Image: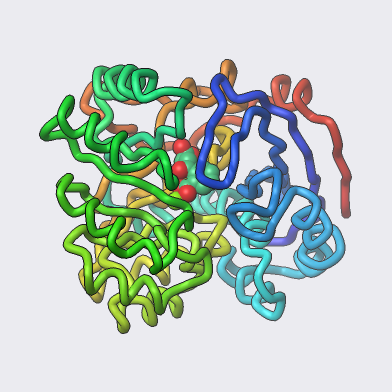
Amino acid sequence: MKITQVELLELQLPLVAFFETSFGRTVNRRIVLVRIEADGLAGWGEVTCGEQPFYNYETPETAWHILRDFLIPWALGSPWNTASDLALRFRPIRGHNMAKAALENALWDVEAQEKGVPIAKLLGGTTDEIACGVSIGIQNSIDELVAKVERELAAGYQRIKIKIKPGWDLDVIDRLRSRFPSVKLMADANSAYSLDDLDHLKLFDQFDLMMIEQPLGWDDLIDHAKLQRKLNTPVCLDESIHSADDARKAIEIGAGKIINIKLGRVGGYTSARQLHDVCWSAQIPVWCGGMLESGIGRAHNIALSTLRGFTLPGDVSSSRRYWKEDIIQPEVIISPRGTIRVPQNPGLGFSPDLDRIARATVRRESFR
Ligand code: OSB
Ligand code: MG
Protein backbone atom coordinates (compact mmCIF):
# COMPACT_ATOMS: atom_id res chain seq x y z
CA MET A 1 0.00 0.00 0.00
CA LYS A 2 1.27 3.44 -0.87
CA ILE A 3 -0.20 6.48 0.87
CA THR A 4 -0.34 9.27 -1.70
CA GLN A 5 -2.32 11.87 0.23
CA VAL A 6 -3.18 12.66 3.83
CA GLU A 7 -5.71 15.17 5.00
CA LEU A 8 -6.06 16.50 8.55
CA LEU A 9 -9.45 17.88 9.50
CA GLU A 10 -10.48 19.58 12.70
CA LEU A 11 -14.20 19.40 13.48
CA GLN A 12 -16.25 21.28 16.07
CA LEU A 13 -19.02 19.04 17.31
CA PRO A 14 -21.34 19.98 20.20
CA LEU A 15 -22.28 17.11 22.51
CA VAL A 16 -26.01 16.60 23.10
CA ALA A 17 -25.29 16.89 26.83
CA PHE A 18 -22.25 17.95 28.83
CA PHE A 19 -19.94 15.15 29.99
CA GLU A 20 -18.23 15.66 33.34
CA THR A 21 -15.38 13.67 34.89
CA SER A 22 -13.19 14.27 37.92
CA PHE A 23 -10.94 16.41 35.69
CA GLY A 24 -13.61 18.64 34.16
CA ARG A 25 -16.67 19.18 32.00
CA THR A 26 -16.80 18.86 28.20
CA VAL A 27 -19.56 20.58 26.22
CA ASN A 28 -18.08 20.94 22.73
CA ARG A 29 -15.71 18.46 21.15
CA ARG A 30 -12.77 19.43 18.94
CA ILE A 31 -12.15 16.34 16.86
CA VAL A 32 -9.17 15.77 14.58
CA LEU A 33 -9.80 13.31 11.76
CA VAL A 34 -7.21 11.78 9.47
CA ARG A 35 -8.22 10.87 5.93
CA ILE A 36 -5.69 9.02 3.80
CA GLU A 37 -5.64 8.00 0.18
CA ALA A 38 -3.75 4.85 -0.68
CA ASP A 39 -3.95 2.79 -3.86
CA GLY A 40 -6.99 4.85 -4.88
CA LEU A 41 -8.91 4.04 -1.68
CA ALA A 42 -9.83 6.37 1.20
CA GLY A 43 -9.23 5.41 4.83
CA TRP A 44 -10.31 7.25 7.97
CA GLY A 45 -9.01 7.53 11.52
CA GLU A 46 -9.75 9.73 14.55
CA VAL A 47 -7.47 11.34 17.11
CA THR A 48 -9.24 10.58 20.38
CA CYS A 49 -7.58 13.15 22.65
CA GLY A 50 -9.48 15.59 24.82
CA GLU A 51 -9.49 19.34 24.26
CA GLN A 52 -7.17 19.89 27.22
CA PRO A 53 -4.26 17.76 28.51
CA PHE A 54 -6.24 16.46 31.50
CA TYR A 55 -6.82 12.79 30.59
CA ASN A 56 -3.34 12.48 29.12
CA TYR A 57 -0.90 15.02 27.69
CA GLU A 58 -2.20 15.00 24.11
CA THR A 59 -4.40 17.77 22.70
CA PRO A 60 -5.66 18.55 19.18
CA GLU A 61 -2.67 20.89 18.78
CA THR A 62 0.00 18.40 19.87
CA ALA A 63 -1.56 15.76 17.62
CA TRP A 64 -1.64 18.12 14.65
CA HIS A 65 2.04 18.96 15.24
CA ILE A 66 3.19 15.35 15.58
CA LEU A 67 1.15 14.25 12.57
CA ARG A 68 2.20 17.15 10.33
CA ASP A 69 5.88 17.23 11.23
CA PHE A 70 6.67 13.53 11.83
CA LEU A 71 4.05 10.86 11.27
CA ILE A 72 2.65 12.04 7.93
CA PRO A 73 6.08 12.65 6.30
CA TRP A 74 7.16 9.17 7.48
CA ALA A 75 3.98 7.56 6.14
CA LEU A 76 3.83 9.23 2.72
CA GLY A 77 5.34 7.63 -0.34
CA SER A 78 6.82 4.42 1.12
CA PRO A 79 5.22 1.06 0.37
CA TRP A 80 3.60 -0.65 3.38
CA ASN A 81 2.77 -4.34 3.27
CA THR A 82 0.42 -4.04 6.22
CA ALA A 83 -0.85 -1.30 8.51
CA SER A 84 1.19 -2.93 11.28
CA ASP A 85 4.38 -2.12 9.33
CA LEU A 86 3.45 1.54 9.62
CA ALA A 87 2.99 1.11 13.38
CA LEU A 88 6.51 -0.32 13.54
CA ARG A 89 7.85 2.72 11.64
CA PHE A 90 6.28 5.03 14.26
CA ARG A 91 7.96 3.31 17.19
CA PRO A 92 10.97 5.67 17.50
CA ILE A 93 8.57 8.48 18.41
CA ARG A 94 7.99 8.44 22.15
CA GLY A 95 4.36 8.60 23.16
CA HIS A 96 1.80 10.63 21.20
CA ASN A 97 -0.17 7.41 20.87
CA MET A 98 -3.44 9.08 19.90
CA ALA A 99 -1.81 10.85 16.95
CA LYS A 100 -0.17 7.58 15.85
CA ALA A 101 -3.38 5.59 16.22
CA ALA A 102 -5.39 7.90 13.96
CA LEU A 103 -2.99 7.39 11.03
CA GLU A 104 -2.33 3.69 11.60
CA ASN A 105 -6.04 2.93 11.95
CA ALA A 106 -6.82 4.80 8.72
CA LEU A 107 -4.40 2.43 6.98
CA TRP A 108 -6.18 -0.58 8.56
CA ASP A 109 -9.33 0.77 6.92
CA VAL A 110 -7.59 0.76 3.52
CA GLU A 111 -5.95 -2.63 4.06
CA ALA A 112 -9.28 -4.19 5.01
CA GLN A 113 -10.95 -2.69 1.92
CA GLU A 114 -8.19 -4.07 -0.30
CA LYS A 115 -8.62 -7.52 1.21
CA GLY A 116 -12.42 -7.24 0.94
CA VAL A 117 -13.04 -7.85 4.66
CA PRO A 118 -14.28 -5.77 7.61
CA ILE A 119 -11.52 -4.43 9.87
CA ALA A 120 -12.84 -6.73 12.61
CA LYS A 121 -12.07 -9.75 10.42
CA LEU A 122 -8.62 -8.49 9.42
CA LEU A 123 -7.83 -7.99 13.10
CA GLY A 124 -8.91 -11.52 14.00
CA GLY A 125 -12.22 -10.68 15.66
CA THR A 126 -14.50 -13.58 16.46
CA THR A 127 -17.95 -12.12 17.00
CA ASP A 128 -20.52 -10.19 14.98
CA GLU A 129 -22.24 -8.57 17.95
CA ILE A 130 -20.60 -6.71 20.84
CA ALA A 131 -21.86 -6.15 24.40
CA CYS A 132 -22.40 -2.53 25.39
CA GLY A 133 -22.47 -0.43 28.52
CA VAL A 134 -22.64 3.30 29.09
CA SER A 135 -20.40 5.79 30.86
CA ILE A 136 -22.45 8.44 32.65
CA GLY A 137 -20.75 11.63 33.71
CA ILE A 138 -21.08 13.54 36.96
CA GLN A 139 -24.52 15.21 37.08
CA ASN A 140 -25.87 18.30 38.81
CA SER A 141 -27.84 16.12 41.23
CA ILE A 142 -28.23 12.48 42.23
CA ASP A 143 -31.86 12.57 41.07
CA GLU A 144 -30.75 13.52 37.57
CA LEU A 145 -28.24 10.66 37.62
CA VAL A 146 -30.88 8.15 38.72
CA ALA A 147 -33.14 9.32 35.89
CA LYS A 148 -30.33 8.89 33.36
CA VAL A 149 -29.51 5.40 34.62
CA GLU A 150 -33.18 4.45 34.30
CA ARG A 151 -33.23 5.66 30.71
CA GLU A 152 -30.07 3.74 29.74
CA LEU A 153 -31.27 0.52 31.34
CA ALA A 154 -34.60 0.87 29.53
CA ALA A 155 -32.65 1.20 26.27
CA GLY A 156 -31.04 -2.17 27.03
CA TYR A 157 -27.48 -1.29 28.07
CA GLN A 158 -25.85 -4.17 29.95
CA ARG A 159 -23.86 -2.24 32.52
CA ILE A 160 -23.68 1.20 34.03
CA LYS A 161 -20.47 3.07 34.70
CA ILE A 162 -20.57 6.32 36.60
CA LYS A 163 -17.89 8.92 36.99
CA ILE A 164 -16.83 9.63 40.55
CA LYS A 165 -14.66 12.11 42.45
CA PRO A 166 -14.28 13.04 46.12
CA GLY A 167 -17.66 14.46 47.15
CA TRP A 168 -19.50 12.57 44.37
CA ASP A 169 -18.91 8.94 45.26
CA LEU A 170 -20.20 6.84 48.17
CA ASP A 171 -23.57 8.59 48.61
CA VAL A 172 -24.17 8.45 44.89
CA ILE A 173 -23.28 4.77 44.61
CA ASP A 174 -25.35 3.98 47.70
CA ARG A 175 -28.42 5.58 46.08
CA LEU A 176 -27.88 3.73 42.81
CA ARG A 177 -27.29 0.41 44.55
CA SER A 178 -30.49 0.68 46.60
CA ARG A 179 -32.50 1.67 43.52
CA PHE A 180 -30.86 -0.92 41.16
CA PRO A 181 -29.79 -3.83 43.42
CA SER A 182 -28.70 -6.26 40.69
CA VAL A 183 -27.45 -3.98 37.92
CA LYS A 184 -23.85 -4.39 36.75
CA LEU A 185 -22.41 -1.21 38.21
CA MET A 186 -18.91 0.28 38.20
CA ALA A 187 -17.18 3.59 38.95
CA ASP A 188 -14.43 5.49 37.14
CA ALA A 189 -12.37 7.96 39.20
CA ASN A 190 -9.96 9.18 36.50
CA SER A 191 -7.14 9.42 39.06
CA ALA A 192 -9.06 11.49 41.62
CA TYR A 193 -7.71 9.66 44.72
CA SER A 194 -4.42 8.70 46.35
CA LEU A 195 -3.33 6.06 48.84
CA ASP A 196 -4.08 8.61 51.57
CA ASP A 197 -7.72 7.81 50.77
CA LEU A 198 -7.28 4.08 51.48
CA ASP A 199 -9.84 3.92 54.31
CA HIS A 200 -12.34 5.79 52.14
CA LEU A 201 -11.69 3.55 49.12
CA LYS A 202 -12.22 0.42 51.24
CA LEU A 203 -15.82 1.55 51.80
CA PHE A 204 -16.48 0.92 48.09
CA ASP A 205 -16.33 -2.82 48.80
CA GLN A 206 -19.83 -2.81 50.31
CA PHE A 207 -21.52 -2.03 46.96
CA ASP A 208 -20.66 -5.11 44.91
CA LEU A 209 -19.15 -3.06 42.06
CA MET A 210 -17.86 -4.86 38.97
CA MET A 211 -14.71 -2.76 39.31
CA ILE A 212 -13.29 0.62 40.24
CA GLU A 213 -11.48 2.22 37.30
CA GLN A 214 -8.21 4.17 37.64
CA PRO A 215 -8.64 5.37 41.22
CA LEU A 216 -5.00 6.50 41.60
CA GLY A 217 -2.32 8.37 39.63
CA TRP A 218 -2.65 8.57 35.84
CA ASP A 219 0.82 7.08 35.38
CA ASP A 220 0.92 4.84 38.44
CA LEU A 221 1.13 1.06 38.75
CA ILE A 222 2.85 0.60 42.12
CA ASP A 223 0.23 2.28 44.30
CA HIS A 224 -2.56 0.56 42.39
CA ALA A 225 -0.93 -2.76 43.32
CA LYS A 226 -0.85 -1.71 46.98
CA LEU A 227 -4.49 -0.68 46.77
CA GLN A 228 -5.63 -3.85 44.99
CA ARG A 229 -4.15 -5.92 47.83
CA LYS A 230 -6.44 -4.10 50.28
CA LEU A 231 -9.63 -4.09 48.17
CA ASN A 232 -12.06 -6.86 47.26
CA THR A 233 -13.42 -4.74 44.41
CA PRO A 234 -11.39 -5.40 41.25
CA VAL A 235 -9.24 -2.47 40.16
CA CYS A 236 -9.42 -1.70 36.43
CA LEU A 237 -6.59 0.22 34.80
CA ASP A 238 -7.19 2.84 32.09
CA GLU A 239 -4.81 5.84 32.02
CA SER A 240 -1.74 3.88 33.24
CA ILE A 241 -1.63 1.34 30.41
CA HIS A 242 -0.09 2.38 27.08
CA SER A 243 1.31 -0.85 25.68
CA ALA A 244 1.42 -4.62 25.95
CA ASP A 245 4.53 -4.21 28.09
CA ASP A 246 2.71 -1.95 30.54
CA ALA A 247 -0.01 -4.60 30.81
CA ARG A 248 2.55 -7.35 31.44
CA LYS A 249 4.15 -5.32 34.25
CA ALA A 250 0.79 -4.34 35.76
CA ILE A 251 -0.33 -7.98 35.81
CA GLU A 252 3.02 -9.12 37.23
CA ILE A 253 2.74 -6.83 40.25
CA GLY A 254 -1.04 -7.19 40.69
CA ALA A 255 -1.87 -3.56 39.90
CA GLY A 256 -5.37 -4.57 38.82
CA LYS A 257 -7.59 -7.43 37.71
CA ILE A 258 -9.16 -5.87 34.61
CA ILE A 259 -7.86 -3.63 31.81
CA ASN A 260 -9.71 -1.05 29.73
CA ILE A 261 -8.20 -0.93 26.22
CA LYS A 262 -8.54 2.27 24.21
CA LEU A 263 -7.21 2.40 20.65
CA GLY A 264 -5.92 5.94 20.99
CA ARG A 265 -4.30 5.58 24.38
CA VAL A 266 -2.35 2.50 23.32
CA GLY A 267 -1.38 3.80 19.85
CA GLY A 268 -3.57 1.90 17.39
CA TYR A 269 -4.78 -1.56 16.43
CA THR A 270 -1.38 -3.26 16.39
CA SER A 271 -0.57 -2.29 19.97
CA ALA A 272 -4.17 -2.86 21.12
CA ARG A 273 -4.13 -6.41 19.79
CA GLN A 274 -0.76 -7.17 21.42
CA LEU A 275 -2.07 -5.81 24.71
CA HIS A 276 -5.22 -7.89 24.31
CA ASP A 277 -3.10 -11.01 23.70
CA VAL A 278 -1.05 -10.41 26.86
CA CYS A 279 -4.27 -10.08 28.88
CA TRP A 280 -5.79 -13.14 27.23
CA SER A 281 -2.77 -15.30 28.16
CA ALA A 282 -2.93 -14.05 31.74
CA GLN A 283 -6.73 -14.50 31.91
CA ILE A 284 -7.23 -10.81 32.55
CA PRO A 285 -10.60 -9.68 31.13
CA VAL A 286 -10.57 -6.57 28.96
CA TRP A 287 -13.18 -4.17 27.59
CA CYS A 288 -13.14 -1.32 25.11
CA GLY A 289 -13.09 2.18 26.55
CA GLY A 290 -14.40 5.31 24.86
CA MET A 291 -13.24 8.91 24.45
CA LEU A 292 -16.49 10.61 23.36
CA GLU A 293 -15.62 9.69 19.77
CA SER A 294 -17.37 10.72 16.61
CA GLY A 295 -18.69 7.94 14.40
CA ILE A 296 -15.25 7.34 12.89
CA GLY A 297 -13.59 6.51 16.20
CA ARG A 298 -16.72 4.68 17.35
CA ALA A 299 -16.63 2.42 14.27
CA HIS A 300 -12.99 1.55 15.03
CA ASN A 301 -13.95 0.76 18.65
CA ILE A 302 -16.62 -1.65 17.42
CA ALA A 303 -14.07 -3.52 15.32
CA LEU A 304 -11.61 -3.77 18.23
CA SER A 305 -14.32 -5.07 20.56
CA THR A 306 -14.72 -8.24 18.45
CA LEU A 307 -11.47 -9.79 19.75
CA ARG A 308 -12.19 -12.78 21.99
CA GLY A 309 -10.75 -11.29 25.20
CA PHE A 310 -13.30 -8.44 25.23
CA THR A 311 -15.56 -10.39 27.56
CA LEU A 312 -16.96 -7.41 29.50
CA PRO A 313 -19.38 -4.80 28.11
CA GLY A 314 -17.46 -1.74 26.88
CA ASP A 315 -18.08 2.01 26.78
CA VAL A 316 -19.13 1.75 23.14
CA SER A 317 -22.69 3.03 22.78
CA SER A 318 -25.09 4.55 20.27
CA SER A 319 -24.32 7.69 18.24
CA ARG A 320 -27.40 9.47 19.57
CA ARG A 321 -26.07 9.50 23.13
CA TYR A 322 -23.39 11.95 21.94
CA TRP A 323 -24.51 13.69 18.75
CA LYS A 324 -27.63 15.20 17.23
CA GLU A 325 -26.21 14.03 13.89
CA ASP A 326 -23.25 11.69 13.79
CA ILE A 327 -20.80 11.97 10.87
CA ILE A 328 -21.17 8.38 9.64
CA GLN A 329 -23.92 6.49 7.80
CA PRO A 330 -25.64 4.55 9.18
CA GLU A 331 -25.37 5.87 12.73
CA VAL A 332 -24.43 3.41 15.47
CA ILE A 333 -27.52 1.96 17.11
CA ILE A 334 -28.07 -0.29 20.09
CA SER A 335 -30.25 -3.41 20.07
CA PRO A 336 -32.81 -4.01 22.85
CA ARG A 337 -30.34 -6.62 24.17
CA GLY A 338 -27.74 -3.91 24.69
CA THR A 339 -25.54 -4.95 21.79
CA ILE A 340 -24.17 -3.40 18.61
CA ARG A 341 -24.02 -5.44 15.41
CA VAL A 342 -20.64 -5.48 13.73
CA PRO A 343 -20.91 -4.42 10.09
CA GLN A 344 -19.85 -7.08 7.58
CA ASN A 345 -18.87 -4.84 4.66
CA PRO A 346 -15.19 -4.21 3.84
CA GLY A 347 -13.13 -1.69 5.82
CA LEU A 348 -14.61 0.50 8.53
CA GLY A 349 -18.12 -0.72 7.71
CA PHE A 350 -19.71 2.72 8.04
CA SER A 351 -19.55 5.52 5.45
CA PRO A 352 -18.23 8.91 6.51
CA ASP A 353 -20.95 11.50 5.81
CA LEU A 354 -18.91 13.95 3.76
CA ASP A 355 -21.51 16.73 3.85
CA ARG A 356 -21.81 16.67 7.63
CA ILE A 357 -18.03 16.46 7.97
CA ALA A 358 -17.59 19.47 5.68
CA ARG A 359 -20.14 21.48 7.67
CA ALA A 360 -18.39 20.77 10.98
CA THR A 361 -14.84 21.35 9.70
CA VAL A 362 -13.07 24.44 11.02
CA ARG A 363 -9.52 23.67 9.87
CA ARG A 364 -7.94 21.44 7.26
CA GLU A 365 -4.49 20.77 5.87
CA SER A 366 -3.44 18.51 3.00
CA PHE A 367 -0.20 16.64 2.47
CA ARG A 368 1.08 14.69 -0.51
O1 OSB B 1 -11.89 7.56 31.50
O2 OSB B 1 -13.06 6.33 30.27
C1 OSB B 1 -12.66 7.46 30.56
C2 OSB B 1 -14.38 10.11 28.40
C3 OSB B 1 -13.35 11.01 28.24
C4 OSB B 1 -12.16 10.76 28.86
C5 OSB B 1 -11.96 9.62 29.63
C6 OSB B 1 -12.98 8.69 29.77
C7 OSB B 1 -14.21 8.97 29.17
C8 OSB B 1 -15.38 8.11 29.31
C9 OSB B 1 -16.43 8.23 28.24
O3 OSB B 1 -15.60 7.40 30.27
C10 OSB B 1 -16.62 7.00 27.47
C11 OSB B 1 -17.50 7.28 26.28
O4 OSB B 1 -18.71 7.25 26.46
O5 OSB B 1 -16.97 7.54 25.18
MG1 MG C 1 -11.56 5.66 32.35
From this view, report whether residue 176 is shown above or below residue 314. above
Q: Is residue 299 visible?
A: no
Q: Position of residue 158 (x, y in %)?
A: 23, 34
Name the residue nearer the viewer: 127 or 281.
Answer: 281
Can residue 219 be seen?
yes
Asked if 38 appears above or below 163 in the picture, the reply is below
Relative height, residue 120 to residue 57 (above, below) = above
Q: In the shown orientation, is residue 50 left or right of residue 183? A: right
Residue 129 point in image, percent of width and height:
28, 38
Residue 26 placement (x, y as % from top left)? 62, 34
Q: Position of residue 275 (x, y in %)?
A: 40, 69
Which quadrant: the N terminus?
A: bottom right
- Picture residue at 64% right of the left edge, 49% below the top: 49
Q: Is residue 81 left or right of residue 300?
A: right
Which residue occupies 43% across, 49% down? 289
Q: Which colour scheme appears in the figure?
A: rainbow
Q: Residue at x 79, y 29 (%)?
A: 361
In-front residue for pair 56/304: 56
